């Protein structure tokens, strides 16, 4: 059963709120090895939808040091429910360990030759400005937070790069929603991106991807605790958030994996013929409740909408024309068992003029293979960085 | 947005209630061409879960006339949201036209040589005993309706056949959930089934199928109108029912179809970048609301649970042993683009000793191809009936 009450979603919301408070005003230019999240106030941002966010704050982590030429910077972009914490353990203000272990650090593809930056996405709930952040009137944005696009998110990241004094990236790397931003970086700022690494992603959200998102958005909105999006200070729509995550989680895994791993096994100590659960039901309920305890449903809505709106070809004469704008070397990797972002969608990206040969990650885990198969991802990144840019 | 209020779900519920009332007492033995739904009171039924339904009523339609040998009877079994109305127009008490047009009637595979019976499934909401029917205390069963299995459903259908004076079936035909019952008929009553036709179905629900069902069940139960299942007389959980149907609908169609048919088109007159919907979102919302207006959410829950519990091998030494119990000729058909009940699952069924060569229905429509491609289904049935039994 989905959880009830406010629970740890409050922590996520309060993190967003704190990001706009004076206590978060760390020196945005203090580069070098960090011990956690820093913040940069990057000013106003006019969204594609015509709204204005008057004071955007970006939360980020970094690893390594910029070199004298400042040409060793790499941007790593997280997926829907990720954050700036790419590697490292969980902590008091960090509910999850790093989501790409082995990517950054000694012996990893992004070792101390590189200055690595990872920012929480605009619209998120882990320190960057999002629906749970305070609006100028001191109340959380909530329902007033505008619909944003991947391009808006990338513009906010470009403003962060400006603040950090980074004229360009040796590579911009992302998977899934992070891959969408990596592609938009390559299209929007070709002169600033020497390499794009896009893993398990697509040039434009497909009808199928939007279809899977539709009941997720509906489940959150039908939760009476949602209150139209203005639930801060009260119970959060955790039940709706949990249902949304259950749907998403199935799309993230492969049928084969679920059948091999769970099959028709009963949950331990329960009898499905007598009202008990199958193990697969318990597994999905666990993951639904787990995300609901750490992730702000309004961020989930706005970020999902931004993925639905993702289309690098929009207003640019189509996908092929947009791909031609990318001047940096494009490395595309797909997961062979991915049923959400299919290998065919990656193959289309790999038709870009600057694309290297398509890389296939072998995994039984479906879309989540882009996280699970971190060794293979590390090889993808190693190969991309070794290629001429 | 999902609809609110009670709406036409009341009609479904009241149909269930009426089925247990005295007005529905048609002569169950009045075979021959009918002008609509009839009812048969088949007595008590002890479920596999250990509960007892003291007075089961089965709603059915029939076409044609039993011959003197009573060996021309065919049973047609509907899927999750279907009913006894296999062919024919909608009517005042029948919200949907026939779901397998072209299967029954002059020139169809089931022409007047056959006496065709179709019953609403036990647990349903279109006339047969289900959660919306009155319990002995005069109130709807609601949350008290027991968890039932496909085997319980087939036992109720066998009791109906007894009442109709039909010692056996020339064929038992079903798709999806109806195919599950067709298979159980062949396993439970081999002496009564000369042919089994199983379309777009499986020997046992897979982890993947149970996984897709999990957020559907959760969405209905999280709707505050659900009231633990005892919502009759008040508003029905239509929003939760609509979300469940949205999820199911995506599993029923193929990604390719959705991408070709809808792509990234905006809903007419709406702009997704300005808060409007994509056409695929509108389409799913329409189908969610449409089912919620005609189908009882408690029936949806109990029938979905029965599909999760479906496993012809349970208690019989496994699927292969169960398949060996089928003595009638088994015709299995799959839809090549079905991502819910995969062709591989059909191929497994076709390893049964009495199986004919696997038939593949070609369709872009995914699982729903078993309904959409009615011409191909008609050929499957024609071939099955022509084969020696």
Image: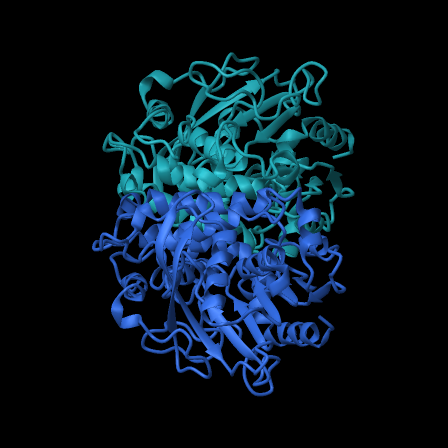
Chain colours: A cyan, B blue
Task: Tell me which residue sits at (73%, 73%) in the image.
Answer: B387
The quadrant in which residue B56 appears is bottom left
Image location of residue A27, percent across then percent down: 44, 16
Residue A346 seen in render: no
Task: Tell me which residue sits at (32%, 77%) in the image.
Answer: B92
Give left or right: position of B72 versus A9.
right
Which of the pair A70/A359 is nearer the observer? A359
Residue B144 seen in render: yes
Note whether A145 is above or below B69 in the view shown. above
Task: Tell me which residue sits at (32%, 62%) in the image.
Answer: B16
Which of the pair B146/B67 is nearer the observer? B67
Q: Quadrant of the C terminus of chain B?
A: bottom right
Which of the pair B292/A297 is nearer the observer? B292
Image location of residue A171, percent across then percent down: 66, 31
Which of the pair A53/B255 is nearer the observer? B255
The quadrant in which residue B199 appears is bottom right
Q: Quadrant of the N terminus of chain B?
A: bottom left
């Amino acid at each position: 059963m989905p959880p009830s009450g406010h629970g740890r979603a409050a922590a996520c919301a309060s993190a967003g709120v704190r990001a706009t408070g004076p206590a978060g005003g760390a020196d945005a230019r203090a580069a070098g090895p960090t011990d956690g999240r820093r913040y940069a106030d990057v000013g106003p941002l006019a969204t594609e939808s015509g709204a204005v966010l008057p004071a955007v704050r970006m939360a980020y982590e970094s690893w390594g040091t910029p070199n004298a030429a400042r040409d060793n910077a790499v941007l790593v972009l997280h997926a829907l429910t990720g954050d700036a914490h790419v590697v490292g353990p969980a902590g008091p203000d960090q509910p999850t360990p790093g989501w790409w272990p082995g990517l950054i650090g000694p012996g990893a593809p992004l070792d101390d030759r590189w200055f690595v930056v990872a920012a929480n996405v605009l619209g998120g709930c882990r320190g960057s400005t999002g629906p749970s952040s305070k609006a100028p009137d001191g109340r959380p944005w909530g329902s007033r937070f505008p619909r944003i696009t991947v391009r808006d998110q990338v513009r906010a990241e470009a403003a962060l790069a400006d603040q950090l004094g980074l004229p360009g990236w040796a590579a911009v790397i992302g998977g899934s929603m992070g891959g969408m931003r990596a592609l938009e970086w390559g299209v929007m700022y070709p002169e600033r991106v020497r390499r794009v690494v896009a893993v398990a992603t697509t040039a434009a959200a497909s009808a199928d991807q939007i279809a899977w998102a539709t009941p997720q958005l509906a489940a959150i909105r039908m939760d009476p605790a949602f209150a139209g999006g203005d639930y801060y200070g009260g119970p959060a729509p955790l039940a709706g958030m949990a249902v949304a995550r259950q749907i998403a989680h199935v799309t993230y895994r492969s049928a084969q994996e679920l059948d091999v791993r769970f099959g028709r096994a009963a949950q331990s100590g329960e009898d499905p013929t007598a009202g008990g659960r199958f193990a697969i039901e318990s597994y999905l309920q666990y993951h639904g409740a787990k995300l609901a305890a750490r992730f702000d449903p309004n961020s989930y809505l706005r970020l999902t909408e931004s993925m639905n709106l993702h289309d690098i070809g929009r207003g640019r004469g189509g996908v092929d024309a947009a791909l031609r704008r990318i001047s940096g070397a494009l490395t595309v990797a797909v997961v062979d068992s991915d049923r959400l972002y299919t290998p065919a969608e990656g193959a289309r990206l790999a038709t870009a003029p600057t694309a290297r040969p398509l890389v296939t990650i072998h995994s039984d885990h479906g879309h989540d293979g882009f996280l699970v198969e971190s060794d293979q991802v590390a090889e993808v990144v190693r190969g991309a960085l070794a290629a001429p840019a």
